[in-house]
């Protein structure tokens, strides 16, 4: 348990660069997606409806939707060879989910990948429609997979710096480390 004075000191030292704060990204993703609003209010003092809604929207709707579009479009693009492509897409997606749940969270490369995919799809008008859908849906799959952890990090870190109760709850549950 951290006192309010210790919390203020930790945040001041973080702001001055003396401390580094580490977060358990998978734990925070789990918190935002699996905990209901009343439990959140009870544990951290806020409902966090916007944060939980947005992360759940990306994780449970947009990410699976882009995965389905990737799989369906691969069937039209690769025909029978899609039986080789689809397992590769699924395997890559599982690997990316594991990779994105660790380390520094930046979104630049994911957004750049979507922009490149859109430019390729729209610049080359002679590309088959389903190939365009395949390229766009794969780039969005990458983005949405990354976005789940990026948003979990962003919302959690923003709340940690502003809300003592939020910080203390997760610090006492070993989801925040200070170095």
Image (spheres, rainbow, N blue to C red):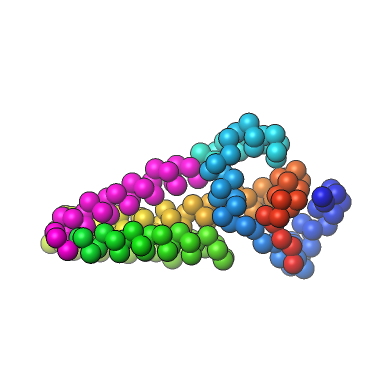
Residue that appears at 55% across and 41% down: 34
Q: Nearer the viewer, residue 94 or 53?
A: 94
139 drawn magenta: no
64 drawn magenta: yes
Quadrant of the drawing holding the C terminus: bottom right
Quadrant position of residue 87:
bottom left
Residue 70 in sight? yes
Q: Is residue 113 left or right of residue 39?
A: left
Q: Is residue 103 left or right of residue 63?
A: right
Q: Nearer the viewer, residue 153 or 14?
A: 153
Q: Position of residue 9 (x, y in %)?
A: 83, 57
In this picture, which residue range is highlighted in magenta? 55-81
Q: Position of residue 24 (x, y in %)?
A: 62, 57
Quadrant position of residue 129:
bottom left
Outermost residue, top direction? 38
Q: Is residue 67 left or right of residue 59?
A: left
Q: Measured along the vertical axis of the image, is residue 1 above or below residue 91?
A: above
Q: Position of residue 123 (x, y in %)?
A: 22, 62
| Most frequent secondary structure within the magenta stretch | helix
Residue that appears at 79% across and 63% down: 13
Q: Is residue 131 left or right of residue 167?
A: left
Q: Position of residue 125 (x, y in %)?
A: 16, 60
Residue that appears at 58% across and 35% down: 36
């Amino acid at each position: 348990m951290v006192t309010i004075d210790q919390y203020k000191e930790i945040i001041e030292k973080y702001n001055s660069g003396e401390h580094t704060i580490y977060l358990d990204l998978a734990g925070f993703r789990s918190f935002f997606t699996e905990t209901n609003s009343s439990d959140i209010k009870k544990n951290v003092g806020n409902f966090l409806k916007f944060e939980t809604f947005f992360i759940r929207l990306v994780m449970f709707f947009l990410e699976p939707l882009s995965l389905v579009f990737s799989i369906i479009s691969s069937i039209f693009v690769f025909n029978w060879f899609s039986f080789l492509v689809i397992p590769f897409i699924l395997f890559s997606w599982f690997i990316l989910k594991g990779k994105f749940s660790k380390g520094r969270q930046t979104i630049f490369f994911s957004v750049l990948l979507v922009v490149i995919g859109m430019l390729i799809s729209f610049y080359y008008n002679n590309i088959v429609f389903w190939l365009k859908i395949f390229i766009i849906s794969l780039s969005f799959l990458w983005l949405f997979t990354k976005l789940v952890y990026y948003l979990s990090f962003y919302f959690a870190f923003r709340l940690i710096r502003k809300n003592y109760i939020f910080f203390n709850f997760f610090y006492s549950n070993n989801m925040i480390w200070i170095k």
